[in-house]
Image (cartoon, grey):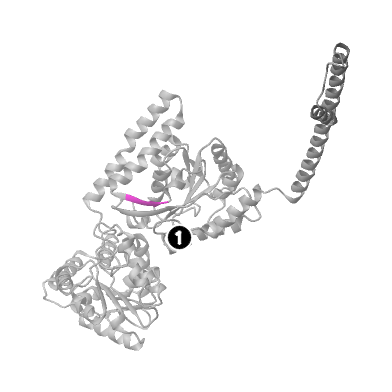
Amino acid sequence: MSAADESGAPKSVSEMRLPGSVAEILASPAGPHVGAFFDLDGTLVAGFTAVILTQERLRRRDMGVRELLSVIQAGLNHMLGRIEFEGLIGKASSALRGRFLTDLEEIGERLFVQRIESRIYPEMRELVRAHVARGHTVVLSSSALTIQVNPVARFLGIANMLTNKFEIKEDGMLTGGVVKPVLWGPGKAVAVQRFAAEHDIDLKDSYFYADGDEDIALMYLVGNPRPTNPEGKMATVAKRRGWPILKFNSRSSVGIGVQLRTLAGLSSVFPLVVGAVGIGALTGSRRRGANFFTSAFPQLLLAAAGVHLNVIGNENLTAQRPAVFIYNHRNQIDPLIAGALVRDNWIAVAKKELAKNPIIYALGKLTDGMFIDRDDPVSAVGTLHAVEDRARKGLSILMAPEGTRFDTTEVGPFKKGPFRIAMAVGIPIVPIVIRNAEIVAARNSHAINPGMVDVAVLSAIPVDDWTLDALPEHIAEVRQLYLNILADWPVDELPKAGLYARTTKLAAKKMEPKAGDRARTAKTTTKRTATKATAAKAVKNTASKAFTKTASAATAKTSSKVNPKVLKVAPQDLTMKQSRERS
């Protein structure tokens, strides 16, 4: 099995070097002599891109009923073995005769953004990145056409493509045919072998990821076959041969189970809102009502959807409050994750566009949330000042410094807002690093899949010594912390970054007295010591004189009453008396 099981959740770190895992790739031989060949439909992308193209043509009334029935019949005949794949793709291509390739490419790009990008398996994306990081020659080898393959390859950073192509005239118009030989089954295997020979790729060290029965021949060619979401004959052969099987459902069609779980979690918002309002009214404190809601809703929604959080650095969530909690932002689940962790006494800051959603706007008002108009600098500054006032009252701030969702394992540029708030109020920054939230939801998805999300909560970063001039430098250092953690995820404990070492040193230095202060302190101490010694000596002399005077008076008085002949004083007693008088 791979690093992702059938539930979509990553395995434990101890299992991450199993075949088919990112760790296995990163430990493999490096260099371009190792090939990594990826199929498209069912492997990199959930479902079939050709179906999406057909649906688009129907929606735009670019396909008549007769053509649709013809395509469906050809598909059934292919499934039943009555026609080869060449006949099927030829049927589809002939229907596009007379169209310009540029027009079809434009449609392909638009559909990728609207429909296909969200279907790319995040687990496969990580595997592609791992192969690229090792310097392997990565190839997208598919029987699909260029208008389906090119956008996906570019998005994943795959430079090499083996794919079917339309026949076109000199002016770019489609002839209705497909360039021969057609890539399918044995023909695709031949194309891969030819590519490997031309690029000095050693197939015995190479990898092949595919799901379809037609690609079984290619699995035998490479040293590391990786059947991905296999069914039918491919699954049977893989089990018999002992090939590692990768199965993912993080981007499968949203089934009724996922929809019901998400709906169940969302439905909890209404009784929780009523409860929050009631608690606020009974206690006379809106904040208590808001805390009831923020402590319950994110946790209930994630639990209902089957999302579990694997958190490192949990203690940093409460070590210093209030604080500005920042998190990296990839999808609509990230704010829920951050809110579930911080729990209470926090307010969220979000872009004004979200306030157009009546539910989000109402929840924002309930929890004292703030919406920033990024297009109006004056309004944005005023909003930030209002946020600062709330922080001064003891509330923590929840913000995404990237300002928008970034569907990438990288981290977008950080904006200054969260850091300026921390500096203005004098509270620390607490980074929350979310590793793989895209497993449970795509960038624009409203449905939540079950899975395990890894989170690292870093130690608080004080900003006491920060200046506005050096702010860009400090922000870059904090962003680098995110990049470092995501590139090398901690296992048991958080790494000690250089930023924290410098912060600790500055704090220690801040507690040390300055040279001038030390000199003044020493001088004052010496003066106080001398004064104290003089005073002690004066007291001693005064006491000695008083004692002598008293003793003399007592002696005189005694002498007048006692007969000198009767009084006898031993020599040692006299010596002791004289000694006392001298002292």
Residue 105 shows in the view: no
487 in relation to 505, above or below:
below
427 in relation to 560, above or below:
below
Which quadrant is the C terminus positioned in? top right
Which residue lies most toward the front here?
Answer: 565
The residue shown at (46%, 32%) is: 287
- Magenta: main secondary structure: strand
Residue 292 shows in the view: yes
Callout 1 amino acid = Ile
Q: How many labels does the image show?
A: 1
At which x and y percent is residue 458?
A: 47, 52
- Residue under numbered circle 1: 485
Q: Nearer the viewer, residue 492 or 407?
A: 492
Using the rendered view, name the quadrant where residue 106 is placed.
bottom left
- Label 1: few (<14), some or many (≥20) within 10 Å? some
Q: Which of 513 and 319 is in front in this view?
A: 513
Q: Give the side of residue 185 with respect to residue 36, left or right.
A: left
Report if residue 218 lies within the magenta region. Answer: no
Which quadrant is the N terminus positioned in? bottom left
Q: Which of 506 and 481 is in front in this view?
A: 506
The residue shown at (27%, 68%) is: 43
The residue shown at (86%, 11%) is: 561
At which x and y percent is residue 29?
A: 36, 78
At which x and y percent is residue 67?
A: 20, 68
At which x and y percent is residue 246?
A: 25, 66
Q: Judging from the image, what secondary structure is the residue with disc 1 in?
A: helix
Using the rendered view, name the quadrant where residue 100 is placed.
bottom left
Q: Give the range drawn in magenta.
A: 308-312
